[in-house]
Image (spheres, rainbow, N blue to C red):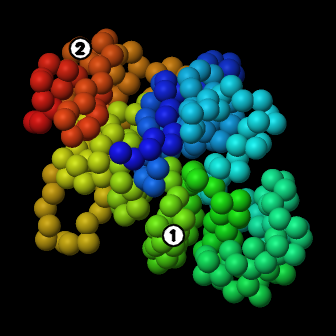
Amino acid sequence: MTETILEVTNLKKYFNHKHVVKAVDGVSFTLKKGETLGIVGESGCGKSTTGRMLMRLIDATEGSIVFQGKNLVDLSIKQMRAMRKDVQMIFQDPYASLNPRHTIERIIEEPMIVHKMGNKIERKERVRELLEIVGLSSDYAKRYPHQFSGGQRQRIGIARALAVRPKLIIADEPVSALDVSVQAQVLNLLDDLQKKFELTYLFIAHDLSVVRHISNRVAVMYLGRIVELANRDDLYDHPKHPYTKALLSSVPIPAPDFEKEETELKGDIPSPSNPPTGCPFHTRCPLVMEKCKTKVPQARQNSNGHYVVCHLYNDKEDMAI
């Protein structure tokens, strides 16, 4: 049986401005060792906020984040700093996440300095090794971030994340700022690194085709909540939630003669400072029922582990339509 490396329960993040903004509102999931869980959804759904809470870059309002038996929410700043050796992050913008005043060698070496790994000679050798691992020349170590393309900078960000030999990597839209051809290269690199170093990924993205390429399971978020979670192929071939169906129908298919069922979403995403009553998706749902407007749907899960939160399935023993 595969070890569960991460267990997130009822995770919430509320920001207090003029109104309470419910950025993440009760997210729960597990992540097994060596697995990739993709999180998808429209901009503002809370997926990046979820990733940053797992790193404790922002603190959770409520809930638990249990990583290898330790609740990260309860750790002190010092304890969390030590824990980050095992949990690293790849950021969306490959330029903004690299210090332009530091050489590539210094950027990749810094996590090793923080965690007191090796001496100076060993660290410099490790930097050169990592550059080679991510497909860059070790001669690049003395260069600066502005001398590289976007794809090369993201490879440097990946090398930095690998520097301290982490067990879990949170990738926050790591290819969204890259050209399509470069995206494929970086995704293949991440896949190869996962197999080589037995890494576990939480992969956050809004591009459904990218998530399908790299994930084992996929969670779909809407307005701070997970509305559907399933095995990759099950979710893409047999989506249950109307929101998931709408997202998938919007993905272009490079076949002009292919006809597919399209689900049109009307209106804008409601404000997380004033979410709708009942089901948060009912204001845009093409299958809305009267009870959706007042009653919060319960989560259902079938024998295949396909999880969905929708009134369409609350009265059925099996979620098959």
User: Badge 2, how many Cα within 10 Å: few under 14, some, many 20+?
Assistant: few
Number of numbered tags placed on the structure image: 2
In the depicted structure, whether residue 289 falls above or below residue 193:
above
Quadrant into which the C terminus falls: top left
> Could you tell whether 300 is left or right of 197 in the image?
left
Give amino acid for label 1.
Lys
- Whether the residues at callouts 1 and 2 have beta carbons within 8 Å, the answer is no
Residue farthest front in this picture: 1
Quadrant into which the N terminus falls: top left
Question: Which residue shows up at 68% across the image and 74% down it?
Answer: 130
Callout 1: helix, strand or loop? Answer: helix
Residue farthest top in this picture: 294
The label nearer to you, 1 versus 2, is 1
On residue 291, the disc is 2
On residue 196, the disc is 1
Dot placed on the residue nearer the N-terminal end, 1 or 2: 1
Closer to us: 17 or 193? 193
Question: Which residue shows up at 14% across the image and 19% down it?
Answer: 315
Q: Position of residue 144 (x, y in %)?
A: 82, 76
